């Protein structure tokens, strides 16, 4: 079975400093991996996804993630945090190899951004 | 840009009552999902639906739950006799035709409160 572990439940950074949200996955075959963001009282928005193409994936709002098979990691980074980045971030793996696979969510990382 | 919509945004009900949560997926999408997020916990898969039948369901999705696509546009989740532990945010998602590499687009969620 596939699983996702987000290594930090809470990350706090200062505005303008880099962001690193860590994620490790477990999968028996090539996974599809995603990062979703959830702002307070809002739904889930896709930030970026990896689907076996380029290992460095660029997403919206300046975020990017690198798929490292040897480390089974898919960490999310951003060079410079903005106050509006404060939210809950979920690392997600697509469970099934076939069409219509369910998503398996990590526990989430709450990102705080200090002025 | 097309989006998934959900109604109502907040539903309050008494224990034992039936509730129906409604979703309008993105048109021409073929795969539909319900997930839930209990306060403070991770997002959990409930059920997937394709070609007018359930593709997969989780252990949570017991006989009290049912899904339906009654008219080709709406996708509903019914809970026949609500329990206190059903209180959660319920998210609908839809996915296009490219299989597991396709993004699942989430609605804004329905917050269900069972008293």
Image (tube, rainbow, N blue to C red):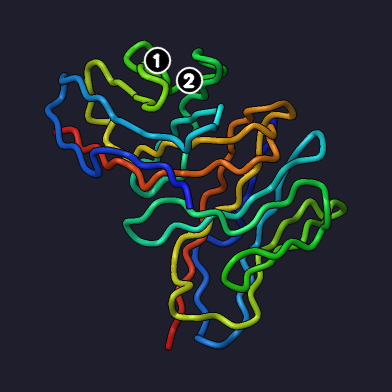
| A17 vs A5, nearest the viewer | A17
Helix, strand or loop at mark 2: loop
B80 horizontally vs B28: left or right: left
Q: Residue at x 48, y 53 (%)?
A: B1
Residue B115 visible from this viewpoint: yes
Counting other residues with Cα less than 10 Å from the Cα at mark 2, is it few (<14), some (14-19), or many (20 or more)?
Answer: few
User: Is the same chain shared between marks 2 and 1?
Assistant: yes
Q: Residue at x 69, y 62 (%)?
A: A75
The reply to whether discs 2 and 1 touch (Cβ–Cβ < 8 Å) is: yes
Residue B84: x %, y % from top left: 22, 30
Q: Residue at x 69, y 32 (%)?
A: B99
Residue B97: x %, y % from top left: 64, 32
B98 horizontally vs B103: left or right: right
- Residue A100, relative to residue B5: is it above or below? above
Q: Residue at x 40, y 61 (%)?
A: A39
Helix, strand or loop at mark 1: loop
Residue B34: x %, y % from top left: 44, 31
> Which chain letter goes with mark 2?
B
Q: Quadrant of residue A105?
A: top right
A53 horizontally vs A4: left or right: right
Whole-number angstrom distance, CA of label 2 to CA of label 1: 7 Å
Tag 1 residue: B62
Tag 2 residue: B59
């Amino acid at each position: 079975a596939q699983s996702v572990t987000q290594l930090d439940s809470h990350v706090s950074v200062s505005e303008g400093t880099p962001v690193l949200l860590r994620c490790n996955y477990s999968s028996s075959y090539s996974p599809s991996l995603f990062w979703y963001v959830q702002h307070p009282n809002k739904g889930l928005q896709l930030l970026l996804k990896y689907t076996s193409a380029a290992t460095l994936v660029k997403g919206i709002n300046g975020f990017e993630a690198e798929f490292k098979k040897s480390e089974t990691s898919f960490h999310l980074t951003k060079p410079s945090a903005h106050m509006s980045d404060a939210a809950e971030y979920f690392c997600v793996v697509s469970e099934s190899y076939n069409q219509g696979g369910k998503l398996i969510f990590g526990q989430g990382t709450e990102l705080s951004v200090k002025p | 840009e097309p989006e998934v919509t959900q109604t109502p945004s907040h539903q309050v009900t008494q224990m034992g009552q039936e509730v129906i949560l409604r979703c309008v997926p993105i048109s021409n999408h073929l795969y539909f999902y319900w997930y839930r997020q209990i306060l403070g916990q991770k997002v959990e898969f409930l059920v997937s639906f394709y070609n007018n039948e359930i593709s997969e369901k989780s252990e949570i999705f017991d006989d009290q739950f049912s899904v339906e696509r009654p008219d080709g546009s709406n996708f509903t989740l019914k809970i026949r006799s609500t329990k206190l532990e059903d209180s959660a945010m319920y998210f609908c998602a839809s996915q296009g035709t490219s299989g597991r590499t396709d993004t699942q687009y989430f609605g804004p969620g329905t917050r269900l409160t069972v008293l």
